[in-house]
Image (tube, rainbow, N blue to C red):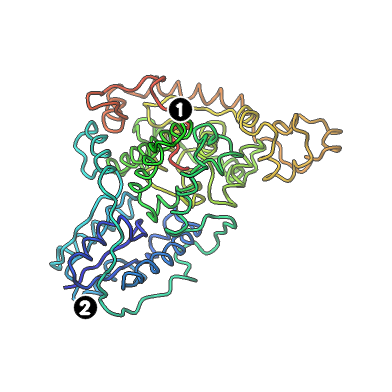
Amino acid sequence: MTTVVWFKRDLRTRDHAPLVAAANLGEPVIALYVIEDDYWQQPDTSGRQWCFIQDSLDDLDKQLRKAGNQLVVLRGSVIAALRELKASHAIERVFCHQETGGQWTFERDKAVIQWCSDNQIEFREWNQFGVVRRLKDRDIWDKAWTELMRQPVLEAPGSVPFAGAIQGVAWRGIEPGTTAADRCPDRQTGGSIRGEALLASFLERRCVGYQYNISSPNTAVRACSRLSPHIAYGTVSLREIYQQAKAAGHHRNTLPRKQKSLTSFRSRLHWHCHFIQKLEDEPELEFRAMHRELEGMKTGPNDSERLQRWQQGQTGWPLVDACMRSLQHTGWLNFRMRAMLMAVASYQLWLHWREPALHLARLFTDFEPGIHYSQTQMQSGLTGINALRIYNPVLQSQKLDPHGEFIRRWIPELAGVPTEMIHTPWLMTPPQKAKFGGNTYIAPVCDHEQAARAARKAVGDFRKQHVSREETGRVLHRHGSRKGSHQTRPKSASQRPPDNQLSLFD
């Protein structure tokens, strides 16, 4: 009797319940990963994501070989792969983790479950996040999350019985779907070894001052844990991260400043799952506004020139453009700047949320659908239960990059511009531009202050005319955060975490 352990976004052997359960049966195990070309045709996938996965598959195979097994990689549909394995190895079970992904993976999973049922193959799946499938009441979610995080971390199995050689495919060199043209020179490296090393360095020293240094793009590169892609693709389990962070924070020799930083970090792991739960509860959020009545706020096609300039880092607002160019090059950006990029697209440029959301998804090496679609809508004012956050790109620049270090790094056109002028280069006189440079940097796409005022008025007018109390109540009941099981009303502004506390991308 052979068991298939189907790896998806859980590319590790430690704290992997399906693998442990299969190994404990003492019967042959096939460790399977399927390269699904149709998935890589989806509009929110990219080559930088696939390259991170390739690194992680290398590492996963090494881990499995230590246990006497090896990774089998097939290409095509999962059902075709299982059909092949059923014919060659008479598989009788499929074990895997639940996945909260986009509509495509949701439909894929349902088809796999149905195929297993039709073929008398046992199908079991485990929860790996604090996300509850078929959650009946949001009030009980926090308790379920806490219970899962407190469960013991499962050690990697020392031995995984091998089902025998299977002709798979070499995952290096494959460029499935539309990913071939994507380049990301400084993307993060995948794999459990790298993820565990990041966790160790963060808990040992980098976490100190975490809550104060994660907003600026200059300090966030080091201050953030940088575990986000490893969490997204499961090279390190969220539970292990949480428990190690808690242990480090409660050690008797830990200084109070470090304790506070790790408490802040753990709270963000909680918010991570809180946002993924939204997509689990309402998969349609990938395609339409959370507050259904707000979907009609922007109609008609987007301004193609504005969209293109935003995508290329050519809006004329230095910090905005520096963030986009940095993201294109590295695949990562701290949350505060991600929020600003999305808000500028939604308000100052008045673009419909969907195309900017898809563009950012492709750029994020750490793309996590449940967080991404909830957050892009939140930053676009489409939840109906959160305050509008219309970022002023100049004030953000002056506050978070006061000396223009980040701007000069990513916008070489402004390298010679003095600090007092670098945040508003369009105000430089022709002689100043001739003296300091900046002639080649593009003028702003519009007056950002005027555009922000117009957007705020347009949103306010639309809400007054088209938003009902009933729909707002529906969103709050289904997706609102809970301070306790009794809470059914929205938190006050003072109770809500600030925007940079909702970072689930660190």
Q: x, y percentage for residue 62? A: 40, 69
Task: Left or right? Give the position of 323 relative to 7.
Answer: right
Residue closest to the eye, 322 or 264: 264
Q: Residue at x 63, y 37 (%)?
A: 319
Q: Estimate how packed mark 1 is, as few (under 14), some (14 to 19) or many (20 or more) residues with alpha carbons within 10 Å.
A: few
**Is disc 1 placed on a helix, strand or loop?**
loop
- The residue that disc 1 covers is 498
Q: Residue furthest left?
A: 120
Using the image, determine if residue 334 lies above or below residue 108.
above
Q: x, y percentage for residue 323? A: 60, 42
Tell me the tag on residue 363.
none
Tell me the tag on residue 87.
2
Q: x, y percentage for residue 116? A: 18, 64
Q: Residue at x 49, y 27 (%)?
A: 389
Task: Left or right? Give the position of 323 relative to 297.
Answer: right
Q: x, y percentage for residue 99? A: 30, 52
Tell me where residue 32 sits by quadrant: bottom left
Q: Earlier in the sequence, mark 2 or mark 1?
A: 2
**Is disc 2 placed on a helix, strand or loop?**
helix
Please name which of the two marks, 2 or 1, marks the residue nearer to the observer. Answer: 1
Q: Residue at x 36, y 76 (%)?
A: 168
Task: Left or right? Give the position of 298 relative to 4.
Answer: right
